[in-house]
Image (cartoon, helix red, strand yellow):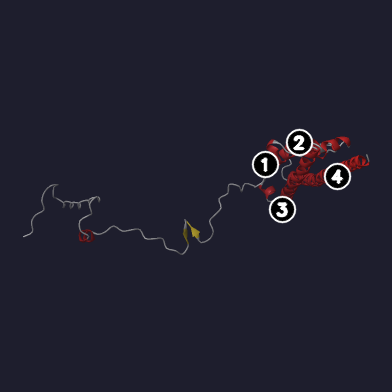
């Protein structure tokens, strides 16, 4: 009887230890997900600030493009609205990316704007921020995937259900919005010149090989008959008739 109680007690202790370990693992994953989302939120706020400054810069050169500028500002305001879930935030950011793409297309028609140092600096900062957002999104989604796997699989789902630990949403951009905004200012199809000292596939300073010259009549006769199978040598051209001499008339013999 005592041994049975001891065995039961050991089993209960082991189950409690297992439950504590699973619970701590779930809490750790949930904290990682929340931390990763905070990193995304910081980068998104920086992106919104850069887009606002970009719009103000474009206004100085393309103030009459009011419709495009208003679309960007409306999409920016929607993306900055609080209380959005990761899926809703991803949708808002996608719409903002589309509006930003149209703004960049408008900037292509203004050479002075493209050459503006402030505009170029903002564009570079925005590209760098987009890269950091993409990296933070991958980290966040990896943690979400691991947490959701624990929540949905047996036996850890039992502990998750007991303590109301549920699934988290992914932060994903669908369709055309998946690619970041790219700006090349018309240099994507530019022809890149060859390096100096290189022209037409021949390095500079090296003379081109001479073209082969045709053999003279004396060299051809000295070479002997043509080998079998070779093309026959055409006969020499007949001399042109002298003035006053009809075609087919023999020239006079010299005494």
User: Which sits in the foreground, 20 or 244?
Assistant: 20
* Residue 170 at x, y percent in the picture: 77, 38
Ranked by sequence position, the earlier of labels 3 and 1 is 1
Mark nearest the camera among 4 and 3 is 4
| Distance from Cα at disc 4 to Cα at disc 3 | 56 Å
Residue receiving disc 2: 91
Q: Is residue 95 above or below residue 205?
A: above
Q: Mark 4 falls on what kind of element? A: helix
Displayed quadrant of residue 84: top right
Residue receiving disc 1: 105
Q: Mark 1 falls on what kind of element? A: helix
Displayed quadrant of residue 14: top right
The C terminus sits in image quarter: bottom left
**Marks 4 and 2: CB-CB under 8 Å?**
no
Which of the numbered marks, if any, corresponds to residue 21?
4
* Circle 1 Cα neighbour tier, 10 Å, few/some/many (<14 / 14–19 / ≥20): few
Residue receiving disc 3: 117
């Amino acid at each position: 009887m005592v041994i049975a109680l001891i065995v039961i007690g050991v089993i209960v202790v082991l189950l409690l230890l297992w439950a504590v370990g699973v619970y701590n693992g779930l809490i750790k994953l949930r904290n990682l997900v929340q931390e990763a989302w905070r990193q995304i939120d910081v980068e998104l706020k920086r992106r919104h600030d850069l887009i606002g400054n970009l719009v103000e810069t474009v206004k100085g050169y393309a103030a009459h493009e009011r419709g495009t500028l208003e679309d960007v500002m409306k999409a920016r305001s929607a993306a900055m609205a609080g209380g959005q879930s990761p899926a809703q935030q991803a949708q808002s950011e996608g719409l903002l990316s589309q509006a930003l793409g149209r703004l960049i297309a408008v900037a292509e028609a203004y050479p002075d704007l493209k050459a503006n140092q402030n505009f170029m600096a903002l564009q570079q900062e925005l590209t760098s921020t987009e890269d950091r957002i993409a990296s933070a999104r991958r980290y966040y989604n990896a943690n979400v995937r691991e947490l959701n796997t624990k929540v949905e699989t047996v036996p850890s789902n039992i502990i998750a259900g007991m303590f109301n630990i549920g699934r988290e949403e992914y932060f994903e951009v669908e369709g055309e919005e998946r690619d970041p905004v790219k700006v090349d200012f018309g240099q994507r199809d530019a022809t890149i010149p060859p390096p100096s000292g290189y022209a037409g596939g021949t390095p500079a300073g090296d003379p081109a090989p001479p073209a082969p010259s045709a053999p003279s009549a004396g060299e051809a006769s000295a070479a002997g008959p043509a080998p079998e199978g070779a093309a026959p040598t055409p006969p020499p051209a007949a001399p042109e008739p002298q003035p006053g001499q009809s075609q087919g008339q023999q020239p006079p013999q010299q005494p």
